[in-house]
């Protein structure tokens, strides 16, 4: 075990309901277990004598992500992917940087940190046929959404900014006043992209009798789909526009006026709905941060700032 925290590799992981994101990678939260080795090594995690195919579909909703081993296994996969992207050694000490919604941060911080840390003991596993021995030496937790905005210098001089982190299951809202979250404004609404995709799928089925996958719908929302029925495309974009209006209405009902101050939209939902948020919605100054890995990058950045502060004695 590497005991010196300064030797650890900092890896940010954003544990979404629909997707796991690290600085360089993003993949769906699906996890399918097998007693025996699958026919392919691609996206296969081997841990504790079992095999798991990672990234196939998405997890059933878990409001408490610590009640099963699933999110821990997904974290191991994210660490393996990130180490591979960085060309790092497969035996590594890791300072894990992660996040929680500000609305539940104080309540869940201790439990989620213990869930990820596992007493700082080395863990051995294989990912895509490669063996890893990882020691999570420290877990730092930050408010999600807030850390992403801190990466945007042009916003930091604004006296007040609305932040809407559109995730898989929730839309997490807050207002920053002079760069500090105003706790009284924080809301977590069950209005995330899973709701949007499910509603689109249902409307396409009702109107056209077609059963489209979430992957098809997401591809169409990104403007990438080429082999999708034109009538289905119209329904998809119509319903996406309706979803954006519902989100903006929920923001207003939460006491946050996006007509009076800049509003930042981030998360997977912001990336998919970029074309549907604009001046036509009457927003004062909308910012669409469509990098789905931005939270993870923000977590790593804050760990770096903390480390430099400690080294500098301040």
Image: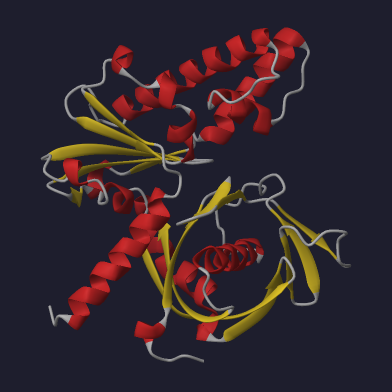
Residue 65 in the image, given as x and y percentages of width and height: 56, 59
Near-viewer residue (228 or 236): 228
Q: Residue 165: tell me if it is visible.
A: yes
Q: How many labels does the image show?
A: 0
Q: In this view, does 139 lie above or below 30?
A: below
Name, please, the residue furthest toward the front. 87
Question: In terms of image quadrants, where is residue 33?
Answer: bottom right
- Quadrant (top left/top right/bottom left/bottom right) for the C terminus: bottom left
**Is 117 on the left or on the right of 314, as rendered?**
right
Question: In terms of image quadrants, where is residue 157?
Answer: top left
Residue 294 in the image, given as x and y percentages of width and height: 39, 49
Residue at 40 percent across and 62 percent down: it is 107
Near-viewer residue (92 or 248): 92
Q: Residue 142: tell me if it is visible.
A: no
**Is 114 on the left or on the right of 153, as rendered?**
right
**Is 7 on the left or on the right of 86, as rendered?**
left
Q: In this view, does 78 lie above or below 232?
A: below
Residue at 50 percent across and 84 percent down: it is 120
Residue 236 in the image, given as x and y percentages of width and height: 59, 17
- How does the figure colour the protein chain or chains? secondary structure
Residue at 79 percent across and 67 percent down: it is 51
Q: In this view, does 232 lie above or below 46?
A: above
């Amino acid at each position: 075990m590497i005991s010196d925290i300064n030797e650890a590799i900092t890896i940010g992981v954003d544990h979404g309901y629909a997707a796991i994101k690290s600085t360089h990678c993003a993949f769906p939260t699906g996890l399918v277990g097998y007693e025996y080795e699958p026919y392919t090594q691609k996206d296969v995690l081997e841990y504790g004598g079992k095999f798991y195919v990672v990234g196939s579909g998405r997890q059933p909703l878990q409001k408490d992500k610590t009640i099963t081993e699933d999110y821990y296994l997904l974290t191991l996969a994210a660490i393996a992917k990130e180490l591979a992207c960085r060309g790092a050694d497969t035996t590594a000490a890791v300072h894990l940087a992660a996040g929680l919604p500000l609305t539940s941060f104080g309540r869940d911080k201790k439990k989620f940190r213990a869930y990820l840390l596992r007493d700082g003991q080395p863990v051995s596993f294989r990912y895509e046929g490669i063996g890893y021995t990882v020691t999570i030496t420290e877990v730092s937790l930050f408010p999600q959404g807030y850390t992403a905005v801190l990466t945007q210098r042009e916003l930091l001089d604004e006296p007040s900014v609305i932040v809407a982190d559109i995730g898989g299951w929730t839309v997490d809202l807050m207002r920053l006043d002079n760069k500090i979250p105003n706790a009284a404004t924080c809301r977590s609404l069950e209005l995330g992209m899973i709701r949007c995709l499910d509603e689109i799928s249902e409307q396409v089925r009702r109107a056209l009798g077609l059963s489209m996958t979430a992957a098809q719908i997401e591809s169409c929302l990104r403007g990438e789909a080429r082999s999708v029925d034109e009538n289905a495309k119209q329904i998809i974009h119509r319903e996406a526009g309706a979803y954006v209006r519902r989100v903006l209405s929920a923001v207003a009902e939460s006491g946050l006026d996006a007509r009076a101050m800049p509003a930042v939209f981030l998360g997977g939902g912001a990336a998919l709905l970029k074309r549907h948020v604009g001046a036509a919605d009457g927003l004062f100054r909308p910012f669409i941060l469509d990098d789905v890995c931005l939270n993870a990058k923000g977590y790593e950045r804050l760990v770096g700032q903390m480390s430099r502060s400690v080294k500098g004695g301040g």
